[in-house]
Image (cartoon, helix red, strand yellow):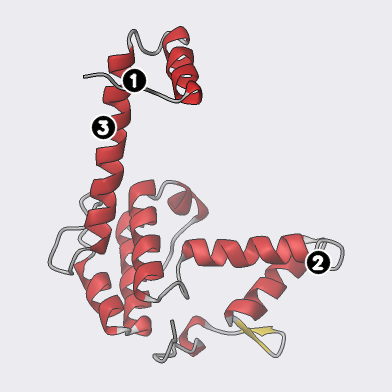
Amino acid sequence: MNISLSPELEQFIQQQIQSGKYSSPDEVFTEALDLLKQRNQEKVDITTQANTIVRSEKGMNHTRLINFLQEGNWKAANKANQYIFWMFANSFFEVTEEDVTNFPCKDLRTIDQLWVQYSNGHFGFSVQMKILQEIQDKEKSQYNNIDNIRDQFGNQVGWRVNNEWIHHSDLKFGNNLSS
């Protein structure tokens, strides 16, 4: 089979071989195909129905979370999410900074993708990160210390009302999100 490659792709393959990581173009292509298959499988796992097993690094079952998200029951989904964090932390009611640091990346990515998918982009860790980055970029001069940035973020995502942090039990979980 004759395949022609763009000059950029040829250069990339040569650089990979020269780096010593691969010994032939076949190895580079094999690795690329494996990564593509893995990426596509992760997408399939995330976009399937609730009765399908979703990828988890530690074998966590995310079915309850998926069911609540599919129903748009954000409060119950948040509690299911909290339960998942507690299970990984092996501690109910307290998740430490170390627990968060050690939380499996694959599960974090899965949870984020589920929230983003079922909330039409309204909820998820990546959504919160985008909001935080926008606040930091837009308000560098006005919110130049971490406390001000944190407060502005809390105001924007609804965790602060009238400039006061609200208790978790007082959070409002609306069920009428538009896409």
Q: Are marks 2 and 3 in contact (CB under 8 Å)?
A: no
Picture disc at residue 93: none
Q: Badge 3, how many Cα within 10 Å: few under 14, some, many 20+?
A: few
> Residue visible at 20% across and 68% down?
63
Earlier sequence position, callout 1 versus callout 3: 1
131 or 104, which lies in front? Answer: 131
Q: Earlier in the sequence, mark 2 or mark 3?
A: 3
Circle 1 SS class? helix
Image quadrant holding the C terminus, namely: bottom left
Q: CA distance from mark 2 to mark 3?
A: 44 Å
Q: Is residue 39 above or below residue 25?
A: below
State the separation of the CA atoms marked 2 and 1. 46 Å
Label 3 belongs to which residue? 34
Q: Which residue shows up at 44% across the image and 19% down it? A: 10
Q: Position of residue 144 (x, y in %)?
A: 82, 61
- At label 2, the amino acid type is Tyr
- Residue 158 lies, in percent from the top left, at 58, 82
Q: Amino acid at mark 1?
A: Val
The residue to which callout 1 is attached is: 28
- Disc 2 versus disc 1: nearer the observer: 1
Q: Are marks 2 and 1 in contact (CB under 8 Å)?
A: no
- Residue assigned mark 2: 143
Are the two marked residues, 1 and 3, in contact with CB atoms closer than 8 angstroms?
A: no
